[in-house]
Image (spheres, rainbow, N blue to C red):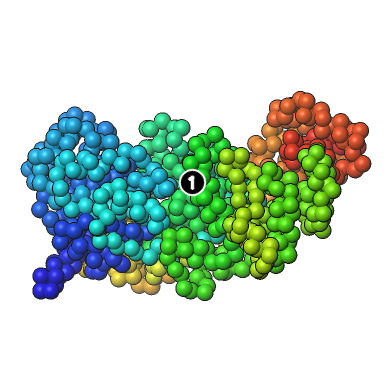
Amino acid sequence: MAQQLIDRELIHQKLKEHFGFSSFKGNQEAVILNLLSGRDTFVLMPTGGGKSLCYQLPALMMDGVAIIISPLIALMKNQVDAMRTFSDNPGIAHFLNSSLTKNAVQQVREDVLAGKTKLLYFAPESLTKEDNIAFLHKIKISFYAIDEAHCISEWGHDFRPEYRRIRPIINDIGQAPLIALTATATPKVQMDIQKNLGMTDATVFRSSFNRPNLYYELRPKHNVDHDIIRFIKQREGKSGIIYCLSRKKVEELAELLVANGIKALAYHAGMDAQTRADNQDAFLHERVDVIVATIAFGMGIDKPDVRYVIHYDIPKSLEGYYQETGRAGRDGGEGYCLTYYSYKDIQKLEKFMQGKPVAEQEIGKLLLLETVSYAESSMCRRKSLLHYFGEEYAEGNCGSCDNCCNPKPKVEAKGEMQLALEALNSIGDKFKIDHLVAVLMGKVTALVKSYGHNKSEFFGAGEEKDSRFWNAVIRQGLIMGLIDKNIENYGLISVNDKGRAFIDKPTSVTITLDHDYDSEDENAVAGGPMKGGGAADEELYAMLKDLRRSVAAHNNLPPYVIFQDPSLEEMSIQYPITIEELQTISGVGAGKAQKFGAEFIKLIKAYVEEKEIIRPQDLVVKGVANKANNKIFIIQSIDRKMDFEDIARAKNLDFEEVLSEVEGIVNSGTKLDISYYINKVMDEDKAEDIYLYFKEDAESDSLDAAIEELGSDYSEEEIRLVRIKFLCEVGN
């Protein structure tokens, strides 16, 4: 007990000395004590929970060198840079990977052998190299740390096969305590990690996955580009990440943001390595505010002051979603997680799975269903997320998600669910969702007719409801596990035993209805409240941020490595004017105070002396330009044969809004020639088919009737474009 007490006193002393913190967060202290005692340790801790400290502090305190296995070069570099700011010894931390020259590798090895280095970072691929293994045989290893350990599991969202080789290599190099850390792991992934690393006897430390500072919101996918621009404009100067599914969308959106005066860059795996590195660097060093990226931009980012994460497309797993949203507010400050959702995106992701091995499809399907369930559920987002990770959230209302702050309207659908299941049970398991919907609504399609389902007792039994409603009911049945999707014959659905039990004894089923975002004020702040920083003196805080940016540029480091936002906020409240006072600020250790403190002290001292009364300046937030009076611009642009996408970009509209504007212009009697655009974006035969429909078959210019008659081979946009052409040529 006495020894434990000494250890505790010592680690608190070292925590303040090296990192400037007076206390540990969550399980950090227990994890560190466990590792210092030489026991294998398994750490489940959310992003922003302080995982890195769990191995950084023991590494500084133990004899020998800690071997840190990390999946990305960028992540290693960030961590090494950060560790060097805590010490006067630049050799305190190093990495060995493919980015180093032969001379640089030699320098690293000399520092390690001379005893200067306490943390040595490897990628799993570098660890397997014979010369590295031979080198590691020469040194005393304090412990091994496996960061982002979920990479070991094929059920994890970033599966890396090379992680499977770590245990045999450790056995070869020599035994030492092992610590595995991950920010996202379901019970299944946890078991997989422990089994593969041979650490089933490890002490497990599981922190709460709740991130109380994050606000979760899902919005219907409508006017997305316009909505995102408005959202960012309302948070001017704040850092954010936007995730998109495709590389094309990443580039288009980054371009659109720049066109609207937002400092943004793109990032995806299709770019060359140098461009990716430069763009990431620009984001870390605050030369741009926004990175638009695919999920390739993930684990390599360790920026604590990201204030929002936007998902343009729904992620394919909740683990991925949790990991990506977890990039926001890692310093404990504001973090807004905004996701745009459309079931069409789910269908896209399902299509991508086709052609993959059945086992992989099975895993993908299960993960995707969890995502759909989360997106469409009307329960607290936080409760849903934590449940997925095996954690109970007891609060009735979290106060920090859209479902809790703005409860969506729900309708009872017990009878409709029973009807849908009975109809599906009747027709059998050889049909897709759209066929079942057609039967329920009484639509005679070729397939309905050929199977005689137009004579079924269920034909037209649900005609009072529209297809959108029935699709929602059926999706809810899938989510509730009442309906199965056939994996081998993809898309075919059937009622399972649980569904048949529901038919016999139905229970309450509520379907969540979408918000009507069309009625929202264009310049209103959607969603949750915007939280300001905690700084008492906003003017000083802004000056400190500017100084931090300049000091960071001089030292070629990201600004957050100098001092994090919470430390600057505290400085603007406490006004420290000596190095000793600066060291009382949270996050400012002796090393940082000596290395970077002088300029900050000088600024604060001058500010305190010169200002008798300080009035915090209101942050000026730029509004989005008024989008009215687009008519003349659109007419002139079409006369100049300008692409609709370019018109949209120029007027900060999305494509749907441009189409609506053009329809309004044409309906008011103005003649426009859009043939140039139709010829560019549409197949000639398709355009002719649609034109002939309006000319010969249509009873009116009804869009719904046209969509129904022409079928799924023609998109709504294509039909609307040709309808505009037809009305101009015939009616105007």
Between 443 and 141, the one lying in front of the other is 443
- Residue at the disc numbered 1: 363
Between 674 and 706, the one lying in front of the other is 706
724 lies above or below 318? above
Task: Give x and y (percent) for residue 90.
Answer: 16, 46
The residue sitting at 35% across, 39% down in the picture is: 161
Quadrant housing the N terminus: bottom left
234 lies above or below 636? below
Dot 1: element: helix
Callout 1 crowding tier (Cα within 10 Å): few <14, some 14–19, many ≥20: few
The residue sitting at 32% across, 45% down in the picture is: 75
Task: Give x and y (percent) for residue 332.
Answer: 38, 63
Q: Amino acid at mark 1?
A: Ile
Left/right placement of residue 37 relative to residue 679 reads left
Task: Give x and y (percent) for residue 550.
Answer: 32, 49
Left/right placement of residue 491 relative to residue 40 reads right
- What is the quadrant of residue 595 in the picture? bottom left
The residue sitting at 38% across, 37% down in the picture is: 278
Q: Could one spot residue 610 in this view of the protein? A: no
Task: Give x and y (percent) for residue 132.
Answer: 18, 35
Left/right placement of residue 133 relative to residue 295 reads left
Mark count: 1
